[in-house]
Image (spheres, grey):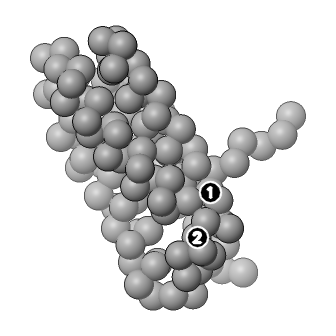
Amino acid sequence: MEEKLTVDFQQIEMLGGLACAEVKEILDDYLDSLDETLEGMSPHFASGDSGAVREEAHRLKGAAKMCGFVALGEQFEALENEAEAGRLPEFSPWSVTTKELAQATRQKMAEASSK
C-alpha cells in the first residue's frame, strides 16, 4: 500500500525551502498554533454552527495547502465540505485525527530538516 502524501516539499521549495528561516518559521507557526485553533473551534461544533466551522475550515485549508501540508489541507477541505452540507462530525474523534495528521506532518518536517 502506498503511503499517503503528508507534505508537499516541492510546494515548500517554491516558498523558499526549509533552509530559509522565514519559511521555516511560518510553517512551524502554523503547526504550533493548530492545537489552540482546534480548541477554539470546539464551541462551534458543540452549538452546531456549521457556518462558523466552514469558514474556519476554509481558512485552515488554504493555509495548509499554501504551506504544502497536503494531509491537513485534505482534512480541512473534507470538513469544509461537510459543514457546507450542514453536517458536522463529532468534534472529539475529528480533532484527534487532525492532531495525529499534524504530528505526522511535524515528523516529516523534522526528517526533512535533519537531511
Callout 1: SS:
loop
Q: Residue at x 45, y 87 (%)?
A: 21
Is there any visible trace of residue 110 in the rendered image? no
In the picture, measured across the screen, residue 92 lies left or right of residue 20, that is left
* Count of numbered tags: 2
Q: From this view, report whether residue 39 is shown above or below residue 65.
A: above
In the picture, measured across the screen, residue 59 lies left or right of residue 109, that is left
Residue at image mark 1: 7
Residue 105 is situated, as x and y percent measured from the top left of the image, at 55, 55
Residue type, numbered disc 2: Ile
- What whole-number distance in Å separates the C-alpha atoms at marks 1 and 2? 9 Å
Mark 1–mark 2 CB contact (< 8 Å): yes
Is there any visible trace of residue 48 in the rendered image? yes
In the picture, measured across the screen, residue 97 lies left or right of residue 108, that is left
Tell which tag, 1 or 2, sits nearer the viewer: 2
Residue at image mark 2: 12
Q: Residue at x 66, y 66 (%)?
A: 9
Q: Residue at x 34, y 67 (%)?
A: 29
**Displayed quadrant of residue 49:** top left
